[in-house]
Image: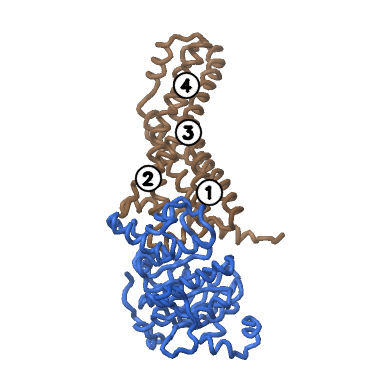
Chain colours: A blue, B brown
Amino acid sequence: MGSPLQFPSAAAALDTIHKAIIFDEVSLCFEDLVLLDGVSFELKKGETKVMLGVAGSGKSTILKLCLGLLRPDSGHIYVLGHDVTTMKEEELFDLRSKVGIVFQESALFDSLNVRDNVAFRLMEEKLPEDEIEARVREALRFVELENAIDKLPSELSGGMRRRVGIARAIITHPEILLYDSPTGGLDPITSTTIIELIMKQRDVSKTSALLVSHRLQDGFMLASHYYDPVTNTMRPVDGRPMRDVRTSFMVLRDGKVIFDGTAHELAGIQDPYIKEYIS
Amino acid sequence: MELISPTDIAKRNVSSVQDYASLAWRALTNLFARPLYMADAIQQADSIGVGSLPIVVLTGMFTGMVLALNSSNTLERFGSLSLTGQLVAISMVRELGPVLTSLMVAGRNASGMASEIGSMRVTEQIDAMRALGTDPYKKLVTPRVISTVFMMFFLTILSDLVGLIGGYLISFLLLGLDTFQYWNTAYQSLTYNDVVTGLVKPIFFGFIIATVGCYYGMSTRGGTQGVGRATTQAVVAASVLILAVDVVLTQLMLSIK
């Protein structure tokens, strides 16, 4: 694991105790293309942040940077108190066990069945077989796919693959979850099912999450509903003051953060670009 | 069409060599790091070794046969037809056994590795593997290197043997040579250096096949079209590199005779 934070003087004010992720002036270019340009934001522990923006605005890049799958050209990224920009690949493997990710196209291992996909990390950690079996079934039960345990990814529908992706991400009970367009390319009913699962994870496990989406309605559904464990459905908040859904929004444009705030603030924004985007 | 400056091309090529060297180095150092994915290595050995048996046997057989036919034509002019076994043995063991086996295995497996790993790359499975805390170089590259080197060694021995049998069949059935004469001259002509040369080469060639295949797979970009490109490039690069390294190894082994 990477060394605990040793802040440079400029970053001394960063609060890594209560923050799951901190981006501090992060920039990244690929040849002549600027992917991120001085991006700074924070994700509080237990918070879900919905990242919106057109294709190519840098949303998915941010998720890969959080896991150290990409390295920024400048700036610092703190994940659970560790500066991932200075950590070696071997050190990142340990940190990644605390961060789950659901990829845009699920990225399931196509030669492994659902069980082995979900159990991949546990098998790598050489856990006992019965413990693996129990945890795989628990994760698959969470996404309501226990009956698909022996199927290959090619035998699953797009929505089912995303759900298996979610099961694989949550099996280690991570402290942070990263969702890369989890509803992209899915029909509205399946999309709602996926959002319900994300909401369930948020409200049951209190996991911090970064969610990339092209669909504004996904974000607003997360910000306006909560998961009811009694009925096993999502219910509208309807102004209940005790129901803090801890969901905020961030809008990216050309690699820059142009909005970071609550659903209420987003709805009342005067910026013409964002107004057009959310209309 | 956009023109690319020669400097950019040079930079890209140097960067590719650097990336390949880095992958080859990691594949080697991972041999001494835990975890060592032996189950994956055995699975790959089955796919590379057992799967390549038919093409290696056929290639070896036909090469031995054609060697006997061609050499007999020349040897007959000098009245030395009895030396056919010697010529087939030295050519097969020193050169054609290792090189042709490697080229066949490269055609079959370097392309397979490039397309398999390349497909994983473009569908984000490699990123998923890293995100799940597994080093793809340890999990995917090192087992392939271990199994290719190991199986190449034995496939070459098999190819040499089958080549000699092929040469014998032609010598016995078409040229009318005596069985004892063929095998005796073949055995007597082989020196320690010939055998060592023939067994050292497949180790290097196996390493080249696996690392080049994995390198092109790992550096695949651009969807399914990119996978196709990586597959072709892997076979071409592995084949050329095998022939180039063959020259160096042959000279090296001759110098320590």
Name which of mark 2 and mark 1 comes first in the sequence: 2
The amino acid type found where label 4 is placed reads Val
Numbered disc total? 4
Front-lying residue, B230 or A138: A138
Residue shown at the point (56%, 81%) measured from the top left: A251
Front-lying residue, B189 or A79: A79
The amino acid type found where label 1 is placed reads Ser
Q: Are marks 2 and 1 on the same chain?
A: yes
Q: Quickly name the residue at label 4.
A: B88
Residue shown at the point (53%, 47%) measured from the top left: B234
Q: Quickly name the residue at label 1.
A: B115
Task: Decide if residue B219 is on the left or right side of residue A46.
Answer: right
Contact flag, marks 4 and 1 (Cβ < 8 Å): no
Q: Are marks 3 and 2 on the same chain?
A: yes
The amino acid type found where label 2 is placed reads Ala
Between marks 3 and 2 in the image, the one whose residue lies nearer the viewer: 2
Q: Crowdedness of circle 2 by 10 Å Cα count: few (<14), some, many (20+)?
A: many
In this picture, is B150 found above or below A186?
A: above
Q: Crowdedness of circle 4 by 10 Å Cα count: few (<14), some, many (20+)?
A: many
Task: Describe the element under mark 2 as helix, strand or loop.
Answer: helix
Could you tell me how far apart the alpha carbons at marks 3 and 1 are, in whole angstroms?
21 Å
Q: Quickly name the residue at label 2.
A: B41
Contact flag, marks 3 and 2 (Cβ < 8 Å): no
- Quarter of the image containing the C terminus of chain A? bottom right
Whether residue A85 appears in this view of the structure is no
Name the residue furthest front: A231
Q: Dot 1 falls on which chain?
A: B
Q: Which mark is residue A207?
A: none
Name which of mark 3 and mark 1 comes first in the sequence: 3
